[in-house]
Image (cartoon, rainbow, N blue to C red):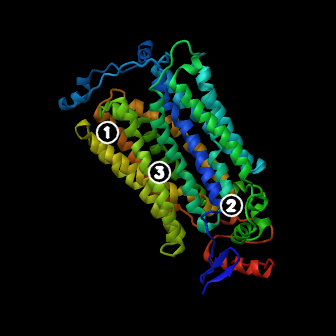
Amino acid sequence: MTKTKDVYTVNESGELKAPLVCSHRLLLAFLAFLGFFLCYAQRNGLAVGIVCMVNPDADNMTLFDSSDTPMIERDIPAACHKHTVQKSRSESQVLFWPKSTRGFILGSFYWGYALTQIVSSVAVNIFGPKQFLAMIICVSSIATLLLPIVSKFGSVFVILLRVVAGAAQGGLWPTIFRFWATWAPASERTTLLSFQSSGPSMGTIVSLILGGLFCGFTFNDSIPFIFRFGWAYFFYLLGGLGIIWSMVWLFFASDTPTTNRHMSENEKEYIQACKAVEKIQDARTKTPWVPMLLSQGFWCILISMVSCDFGLYAIWTVVPEYMNEVLLFSIEENGFLSALPHMGSFIVVMLSGGLADFIIRKKILKRVNTRKLFHGIGTLAPAICLLLISFLNCERRYLAVLLLVIGVALNGFMMSGGYVVNVGDFSGVHSGVVFGICNTISSIGGFCAPYITSLITRHKTAAQWKLAFMLYAVAFLISAIAFSCLARGETEPWARDDVHDEKINYDVDANKELLEIKTAGVVPQNTIA
């Protein structure tokens, strides 16, 4: 028998349910999706934009460029020489930044990104997730908007702007985890978070494709420098849209459901029922640093994230180079093919989030086992695919691309139901702090992975790239093992708010008690053992 309570229902197992379609929480998830879409487009857009901006002859300006390795010395099969493509210089390639400088520029984002993770985790509890998220995306957008303007004055100014953008985006994940800890009912957490988490993949896809299109046009010399080239409008578009997004977010969002002016009272009542008592969910508690840092759940996320992110950062930053040096794809082919894995990841994240919630709701698997299953698929699949890719060369280059697409696509299971979502399972309102600390340490891979790869593949041979891909596979394997052994599925004692001596978790038994609290209008003592 199913009982009805206004906008939500309670089934026989005591689980609270309410329509998600057309709800305000779904609108906020869509806005969060757009915000992450724009941030990751701003983050990764420079990777394709810099190809349009820089004169290829600039590589002759540095003694550290090793691109003169003859084709015949790079053990490339003779059958692959037909794939070699001469690249003509575009009129938009006007900046003379050597290869070493370009690498410096691309890596500078992660310097700022690593610096602000922990600070942002604390700051979001002071300013609230609504204002803080709007602020950091606005700052990142302004830095992106100014990039074409300062590029004329030297690479140092571009590096500074990228550091600022990275520092701003360092607060993205801690802030959004803090936001959903208050807004997302447990039964919808995976769906809402996975929908929002598909934004990075889609933003990367669009930036790779759109950036190439903007490279294709140039105005005459009578137009001022900052408006003359197509790549400049690419950055203006991303920056301008980010500023507009910040204003829209401030209008529709709020720190807590109870303070939202645009949401119905019925929906507020439903979220409050799922979150127990409003004072418990809204209380700003101090961070329990010692028990948190010593907890099994924290170390599970740290090890899983550091190893997994090392592999992901490597894929994101060096795969285009691998396609050029080993698979011998042209720049035009490279841009589109580099976007394919992210397209696959986007689709998987969108579909698998609801699947994880379904498995948990139907009690097919416990929550922690569902997280382990999804994380295992999301890490073992790319490990296997990368291992297979390491044995391929340009003669089977499309098979290598297919394996890359499969591996990165299945990694979407990790994003929608693995460690990314598991943070909120055991750490509650402290999820932003936990994620911020772990993401700070794991972001080291943002500049270490490309550097280590450059050392391994300095002669650009297939054998060297084989070793690099095996290293990435091992990183994913470590993440899979750590998470399967250490993952926690329920709120840990240090993460529970004891404002009213309540011990709140998100399992089915808790939902039964929440119904009693709501209908009786009182707060029983020690409701959950």
Q: Which residue is mark 1?
A: 466
- Look at the picture and state if 78 lies above or below 1: above
Q: Residue at x 28, y 34 (%)?
A: 462
Q: Residue at x 38, y 54 (%)?
A: 381
Q: Position of residue 423 (x, y in %)?
A: 60, 58
Of mark 1 and mark 3, the one earlier in the sequence is: 3
Residue 346 tag number = 3
Q: Which residue is mark 2?
A: 183
495 sits left or right of 226 in the view? right
Of mark 2 and mark 3, the one earlier in the sequence is: 2
Q: CA distance from mark 2 to mark 1?
A: 45 Å
Q: Quadrant of residue 90?
A: top left
Q: Residues within 10 Å of mark 3 (few under 14, many from 20)?
A: many
Contact flag, marks 2 and 3 (Cβ < 8 Å): no
In this view, the residue in front, 338 or 100, is: 338
Q: Amino acid at mark 2?
A: Trp
In this view, the residue in front, 43 or 301, is: 43
- Look at the picture and state if 320 lies above or below 434: above
Q: Position of residue 62 (x, y in %)?
A: 44, 14
Report the mark closest to the observer, 2 or 1. Answer: 2
Of mark 2 and mark 1, the one earlier in the sequence is: 2
Q: Residue at x 52, y 47 (%)?
A: 306
Q: CA distance from mark 1 to mark 3?
A: 27 Å
In this view, the residue in front, 261 or 196, is: 261
Q: Position of residue 352 (x, y in %)?
A: 47, 61
Where disc 1 sits, the SS reads: helix
132 sits left or right of 448 in the view? right
Q: Is residue 490 visible?
A: no
Query: Farthest left residue?
Result: 79
Q: Is residue 466 visible?
A: yes
The C terminus sits in image quarter: bottom right
